[in-house]
Amino acid sequence: MDIEQHKIPQATAKRLPLYYRFINNLHSQGKLRVSSKELSEAVKVDSATIRRDFSYFGALGKKGYGYNVEYLLSFFRKTLDQDEITKVALIGVGNLGTAFLHYNFMKNNNTKIEYAFDSNPEKVGTEIGGVPVKHIDKLEDIVKGDITAAILTVPSAAAQGITDRLVHSGVSGILNFTPARITVPEHIRVHHIDLSIELQALVYFLKHYPLEAGEEQEE
Amino acid sequence: MDIEQHKIPQATAKRLPLYYRFINNLHSQGKLRVSSKELSEAVKVDSATIRRDFSYFGALGKKGYGYNVEYLLSFFRKTLDQDEITKVALIGVGNLGTAFLHYNFMKNNNTKIEYAFDSNPEKVGTEIGGVPVKHIDKLEDIVKGDITAAILTVPSAAAQGITDRLVHSGVSGILNFTPARITVPEHIRVHHIDLSIELQALVYFLKHYPLEAGEEQEE
DNA sequence: GGCAGATTGTGAAAAACTTAACGACTATCT
DNA sequence: AGATAGTCGTTAAGTTTTTCACAATCTGCC
Ligand SMILES: NC(=O)c1ccc[n+]([C@@H]2O[C@H](COP(=O)([O-])OP(=O)(O)OC[C@H]3O[C@@H](n4cnc5c(N)ncnc54)[C@H](O)[C@@H]3O)[C@@H](O)[C@H]2O)c1
Ligand SMILES: NC(=O)c1ccc[n+]([C@@H]2O[C@H](COP(=O)([O-])OP(=O)(O)OC[C@H]3O[C@@H](n4cnc5c(N)ncnc54)[C@H](O)[C@@H]3O)[C@@H](O)[C@H]2O)c1
């Protein structure tokens, strides 16, 4: 939106929702002020990093005082566009897709899964977690112009085909849970969440990078 | 294990399982050789990065030729300890936990979920995806000495309590799917996978980092 | 056997990210 | 009022990761 926004490092941008959630918690608890040190302990991010992150948005705190929770919250709400809802579709109502549909992403979140899609006739027409399941044949009709991002939980063999259809239907982002590394035009953003790899990587680190006292944790 | 292993950058280590999977695919397809460029297109990682990553393990390829798939595969299998199985426990057989139990992580993988745990008596005693569900009271008895890592899919309010018990039972790593940022002793490794944050971050990027032609994709 | 073309492995540079350190300031206590 | 104990924002330094670019070297073919 803003040109200045482009100055914010990606690593920082990825932490913003985390900060937002914890500031929200503090606010619910009635806390009025918070220091970068306190926040650091809660979210497990170095306090200097937090101060640096916040500073990209200007001077949000007061020296010698810390941050005002109320102010921080309203600032982050604005910055993360929490007041406007982003519509999302979920493709593939299987094990993983069903779990996501049951989960209320809206709780702390500006996103709403509006529709789910599947090719299995038994699933089509049902409603899961308040989300109607539509037939995949209707994908383009329903998504076109209305949906910003998609959550992809189909079998990996179907991933590229569905991706092409999503792109054609005008989504700008895809959260890809399949192991397939999908190909998209340059203006589409894909984030991969590859659960098998996460598990394998954890195991690799356990065997080859034994943590010493004082060593830092990994995200 | 090896002292030399410690030289491998963490960013590289995280990509190893991805490489392994694709090399495996190539091998199944009967492909005999592969170049860093081809691999790059498949896994969406810059070819120079791939060559650099491989080079940490020595000279795995041949100039003017590329990499021998068979050799690469056997090398990675050894390096990722694919021949020895790591035992894992899953705690919290709810929406997400059930999905994971149904999924066969073993397929491309050296990990096996041996036991699941839940506090709900209706779930205890059942078997999901071939994994027996035990009562959470038995956690210490069953896990102690036998299980290397845990997948945490309990409600976030229960996360820290269960974590303490897991640590006490001797697990060395936790894959934490709850939004809670758990506290552990220094020798325990925790990887957080925070799905709400991933979705929110994707949306944030869509709005604030419109991709230009030629810009790189995010992992 | 020799040459054209392909591809690696890596030094060096750049980019991205994190952390330490400290001056400037706040709040509070005595 | 002055002393004390924080705390931020930022400069500078350190670390990690990615990327460029090319000599070295191998392949495959004639
Ligand atoms: N379940 C897990 O724990 C897990 C873990 C890691 C990765 N994954 C990946 O997530 C994806 C989904 O996994 P899952 O366990 O939910 O699989 P699943 O088989 O349970 O679900 C897939 C769903 O997609 C539907 N589908 C198939 N082809 C389709 C098409 N062309 N259009 C629309 N819908 C279609 C099926 O009807 C099914 O409902 C897979 O790619 C899998 O590799 C899952
Ligand atoms: N489902 C999703 O899509 C999703 C998305 C993002 C994050 N999460 C997080 O993942 C976690 C699990 O989500 P879910 O949707 O599967 O929740 P869920 O409520 O369906 O499952 C939680 C399970 O944990 C069990 N449980 C509760 N307390 C326990 C205890 N003390 N010991 C052992 N078992 C206990 C419950 O019986 C239940 O079976 C939550 O922390 C949630 O915030 C889930």
Image (cartoon, coloured by chain):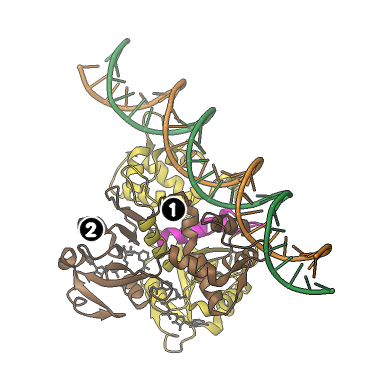
Chain colours: A yellow, B brown, C orange, D green
On the image, the x and y values in percent for residue B181 come to 33, 53
Q: Is residue B131 magenta?
A: no
Chain at tag 2 = B
Mark 1, residue position: B5
**Label 2's element?**
loop
Q: CA distance from mark 2 to mark 1?
A: 24 Å
Quadrant holding the N terminus of chain B? bottom left
Q: How many marks?
A: 2
- Left or right: B214 in relation to A25: right
Residue B113 seen: yes
Respond whether the residues carrying marks 2 and 1 are from the same subunit.
yes
Q: Position of residue A82 (x, y in %)?
A: 46, 55
Q: Is residue A40 left or right of residue A136?
A: left
- Three-letter amino acid code of the residue under disc 2: Gly
Q: Which residue is mark 2?
A: B170
Q: Is residue B213 magenta?
A: yes
Say which residue appears at 37% left-offset and 34% top-offset.
A66
Q: Quadrant of residue A203?
A: bottom left
Relative image position of residue B63 (x, y in whole percent):
66, 61
Task: Please name the residue shown 36% across and 58% down the image.
Answer: A207
At x 25%, y 80%, the residue is B127
> Which span of residues is magenta-colored?
B195-219
**Residue B72 point in image, percent of width and height:** 53, 67
| The image quarter in which residue A33 lies | top left
Residue A159 shows up from this direction: no
- The 10 Å Cα crowd at callout 1, few under 14, some 14 to 19, many 20 or more, is some
